[in-house]
Image (tube, rainbow, N blue to C red):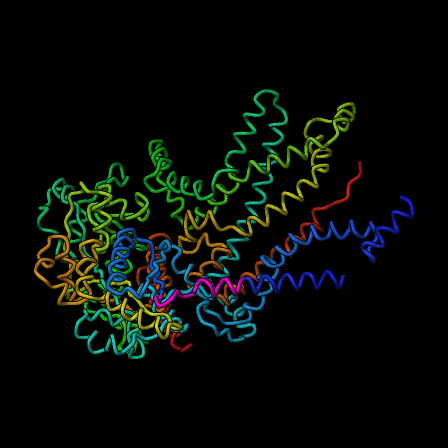
Amino acid sequence: MTSKNDSIVKKKTARFTLKQQKYIFVYTCLLIPLLFFISIRFLPTLYTFNIGFREWDILSEEKPFVGMDNYMTLFKDEIFRKALVNTFIYVVFGVIGQLLCGIGVALLLQRINKFVGVFRAIYFIPYVTSIVAVSWVFKWILMNNGIVNDILMKWGFEAQLFLKSPNQAIYIIILTMIWQGLGFQMIIFLAGLENIPKMFYEAAEIDGANSWNKFIHITLPLLNPTIVFSAVIGSISFLQTFTQVQNMTQGGPLNSTISVVLYIYELAFQHFDMGLASAGTVLLFIIILIITIIQMKVLTKKFEY
Amino acid sequence: MKKLLSVFLFLMVLMVVAGCSKGKESGGEEGDTVTIEYWQYAYKAKVDLMDELIKEFEEANPDIKVKQTTFPYEQYNEKVATLVPAGRGPDVINLYYGWLPKYIDSGYLQPLPEDTFPVDQIESEYFSLVNAAKLDDKYWAIPTAVRTLALFYNKDLFEKAGLDPNSPPETWDELVDYAKKLTVRENGKLVTEGMAYEIGAQLNNWFYDALVYQAGGQGLSEDRKQILWDDTPAGLEAFTYLVEFGSKHKVGESGFYTDDVTAFKTGNAAMNIDGSFRLGTLATDAPDLNYGVAPLPSYKEKATQSSFWANGITAKVEGEKLEASKKFLAFLTSDEVMERWIDEVGELPAKEAVATQDKYVNDPLYGPFIEQLPYANAQFYVDETAQRQYVIDAVNEVLLNGVSIEDAYNEFAAKSQKLYDDYWSKK
């Protein structure tokens, strides 16, 4: 543009150049979601940190400062420790199961040529189904006098307690969560597989590699970013396990399925101990932070084409 | 950058101001009429009746308006707990008696005004069980209606099992005997429950306030600091009786047809221990069910559990609003409202003189519930959720983990006492 134009702009806004104006517009647009984020997410988070050091039963106006008391109480609390162990089980079995199933289904779906859309839809439907509805359907299928026990007994097996058993319940919940998340995993891994250039496989075939070799040396390393993404997202969602447990077992029997989030909810809204609940939330935040950092460091390996 | 920051701060201030002014608006008054807000949980029969009552109350008191707000039962505590600190509280609130200590401790309620509700008058007119709402020598809430537990039994299933549908079990032993006879299994699979076995529903109440007393024990010490049921063998006897329905007699299972009410309603459970509030549900959901109601089977003593939802006035209500709230509360606890409450909701009048009228005592369904009121107990809970969970866990330890009844019971008693110790040490 000419210098004449520039001077007009300068006269109008006095202090900003055209370039600066553009940036101001962009930043203003970005500011609106940022404001929303700060007021809805960030400030309450800081408030939670604050409440974690206080004793507060939600209803009263006084919130006396109690230092680390809430954290000490939580570490001594058997149910909280049980919830930590359970959450660990949810994450380990859940994430590994989800990755394996996701890769498996994606590899199979990549091989077929007919009815691809139908299969993709079938695998994706559970993901868009309401979690509460799915949980109740599984609860009914698996209840003492439900259809699964009917079939088991018809075949001469013993009826199982399933969700009423302190040993089986947590794994059944994990299985339903994996089943429901499968559609999402499948989509990510399919996208990851599409991104691997075909020529690597062709080159490997010429060198006489079998399918297992190709999988180990080409597919898996090149799928690494997808695996990291899926593991991080999966860990965070399994760390926050709540809805399924609340609907299927409410944490029982004997706290065998209680997750940290469910226990935090119970502390806050059933026992009215917001201080303890906030302390638990802070601990969960720290755990998620640490696990995510470790995963980013360990799982992200540099690879060369 | 500085400019951005100041814009941001300005916006924040704007939002806060907007938030505050909105809060004030909603609590505003128009002209000379006073508006009071009433909260209760959503139970259709109660909400409908309350709408009618409010209309009548407003006609009689043209200068008072009452606004009713309801929340689903499952979320009631949660809603109250989150909306009140946000400044959106009611003036008169309906609370479960077991939650009262928590609400009173947090300074959420004010004691019932002595001029309208003198303590001696409450104690002479109402059933003694309402003293569960008494703390520090003051009453903090007052119920319109109370409920008791009784034995519901399916007359058709009694006949099918060769039992007389007009003589329900009256003693502990008879109850076990009947339950066993009524249980139907095919190849080991439970088809009909002799007695529904849902500890988390009403059976935990049955233990605390009925079985313990029936076995000759006591619930809590006078000062509510010590649990007494573990002082005598009565506690263990009651607990053993409760557990053996599941472990030894195997007459019912938790989760059978999802829960006890559904199992009984659909004719898959022959007996169930449930409250008078269930009469309304059964009338609407299962009008063809041929069932009867009997007082709880007894042992050394007679006892039943009772409970109630009570109305209290919140702490910040004062001046005109307090006067209006007092009037409304007096109206809700009048004899006429109590009579309409039993007719339309199915809960029993909280005043002795109203409840013991012939028309209620001789009613085949209400009768057994009212008959038990004089010896009904309402435990003083310090944490209702936790105390219910203790019973569920103790029973599950025996049924699922093979722990001996004594060990499970001892742990249960120790945890219960600790809960009370912790509660009182904070006071």
Q: As drawn, which residue projects farthest toward the right? A: A3
Q: Is residue A269 left or right of residue B189?
A: right
Could you tell me which quadrant the N terminus of chain A lies in?
top right
Residue visible at 35% across and 37% down in the picture: A149
Q: Is residue A159 above or below residue A117?
A: below
Q: Nearer the viewer, residue A252 or B135?
A: B135
Residue visible at 26% across and 44% down in the picture: B263
Q: Is residue A122 above or below residue A138?
A: above
Residue B211 visible somewhere in the drawing: no
Q: Can you tell which quarter of the image residue B154 is in?
A: top left
Residue B408 shown in magenta:
no
Q: Can you tell which quarter of the image residue B380 is in?
A: bottom left
Could you tell me which quadrant the C terminus of chain A lies in?
top right
User: What x and y, as percent, mark residue B305?
Assistant: 23, 62
User: What x and y, as percent, mark residue B70?
Assistant: 36, 56
User: What x and y, as percent, mark residue B350?
Assistant: 20, 65
Start and end of the magenta stretch?
B19-34
Q: Nearer the viewer, residue A104 or A20?
A: A20
